[in-house]
Image (cartoon, rainbow, N blue to C red):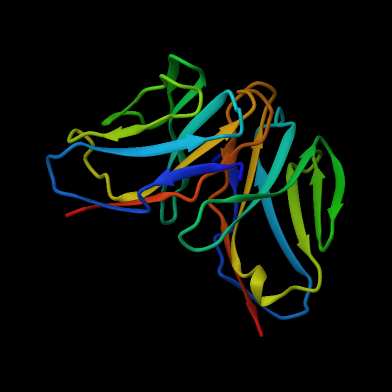
């Protein structure tokens, strides 16, 4: 099965803890993205990567970090510096950065207790 | 003015009706237009992808782009309860990031 997987589906974190969300794709896509979705706010871009070992900040990168050591994987770390981390996190990928459409994973719901 | 405007709904229509979902935008440089469907607690899935102006049809779905009015539409014919979801419009310039609308919640009433 080709596609994008995210794990875990639900994640709970105590305040002050860092947590890492997993995103894996076997579509051979070059570009990968992380979005955050909050009620009434639509999708907001956190980070994106067009190629291995390179990534760029999106619109709301503060309090987050990423790595892109392999083409298939783009993990997102939500650090304790993120003031309001409770949200639905979506990972996406596309064949390149420009005009190709993005395909989304199933999402991870993060709740800070 | 926000780049992409989309009525959040909810929009409730009876089963079998034609549904019209719309987005307006302000950036005349947008060339690529997409519609995504998102079920509750799931990731968005691509429904339609169009370039520039015109219509595109796929089964019960028709996407329409009117660049002169900066207005895009998604029509759903013979709507089914399984069409109940949030529909997100999205668009981009050449070689630039995709901008998403906030989504319209649609309920199809059996």
Would residue A111 appear left or right of A24 to someone viewing this image? left
User: In terms of image quadrants, where is residue A83?
Assistant: top left
- Name the residue located 66 percent from the left edge and 68 percent from the top edge: B83
Above-or-below relation of A30 to A54: below
Question: What is the count of numbered marks?
Answer: 0
Place of residue A52 in the rendered image (x, y in percent of width and height, measured from the top left): 48, 16
Q: Nearer the viewer, residue B78 or A42?
A: B78
**Which part of the image, by quadrant, shows the C terminus of chain B?**
bottom right
Specify the farthest residue to the front.
Answer: A1
Above-or-below relation of B82 to A57: below
Q: Nearer the viewer, residue B74 or A70?
A: A70
Above-or-below relation of A35 to B110: above
Place of residue A87 in the rendered image (x, y in percent of width and height, measured from the top left): 34, 50
Place of residue A58 in the rendered image (x, y in percent of width and height, measured from the top left): 43, 27
Would residue B81 appear left or right of B65 to someone viewing this image? left
Above-or-below relation of A95 to A37: above
- Name the residue located 61 percent from the left edge and 45 percent from the top edge: A1
Specify the farthest residue to the top.
Answer: A53
Q: Nearer the viewer, residue A70 or A12?
A: A70
**Which part of the image, by quadrant, shows the N terminus of chain B?**
top right
Place of residue B96 in the rendered image (x, y in percent of width and height, measured from the top left): 61, 24
User: In terms of image quadrants, where is residue B90?
Assistant: top right
Q: Nearer the viewer, residue A31 or A62?
A: A31
- Name the residue located 45 percent from the left edge and 21 percent from the top edge: A70
């Amino acid at each position: 099965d080709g596609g994008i997987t995210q794990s875990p589906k639900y994640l709970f974190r105590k305040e002050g803890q860092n947590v890492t969300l997993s995103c894996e794709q076997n579509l051979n896509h070059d570009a990968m993205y992380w979005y955050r979705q909050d009620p009434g706010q639509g999708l907001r871009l956190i980070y994106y990567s067009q190629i291995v070992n390179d990534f760029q900040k999106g619109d709301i990168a503060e309090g987050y970090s990423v790595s892109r050591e392999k083409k298939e994987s783009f993990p997102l770390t939500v650090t304790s510096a993120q003031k309001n981390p409770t949200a639905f996190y979506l990972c996406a990928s596309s064949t390149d950065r420009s005009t190709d459409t993005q395909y989304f994973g199933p999402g991870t719901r993060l709740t800070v207790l | 003015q926000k780049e992409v405007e989309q009525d959040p709904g909810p929009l409730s229509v009876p089963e079998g009706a034609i549904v019209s979902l719309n987005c307006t935008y302000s950036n005349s440089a947008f060339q690529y237009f997409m519609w995504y469907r998102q079920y509750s607690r799931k990731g968005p899935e691509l429904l339609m992808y169009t370039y520039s102006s015109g219509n595109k049809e796929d089964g019960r779905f028709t996407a329409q782009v009117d660049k002169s009015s900066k207005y895009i539409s998604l029509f759903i014919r013979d709507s089914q309860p399984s069409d109940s979801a949030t529909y997100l419009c999205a668009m981009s310039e050449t070689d630039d990031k995709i901008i998403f609308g906030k989504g319209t919640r649609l309920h199809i009433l059996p």
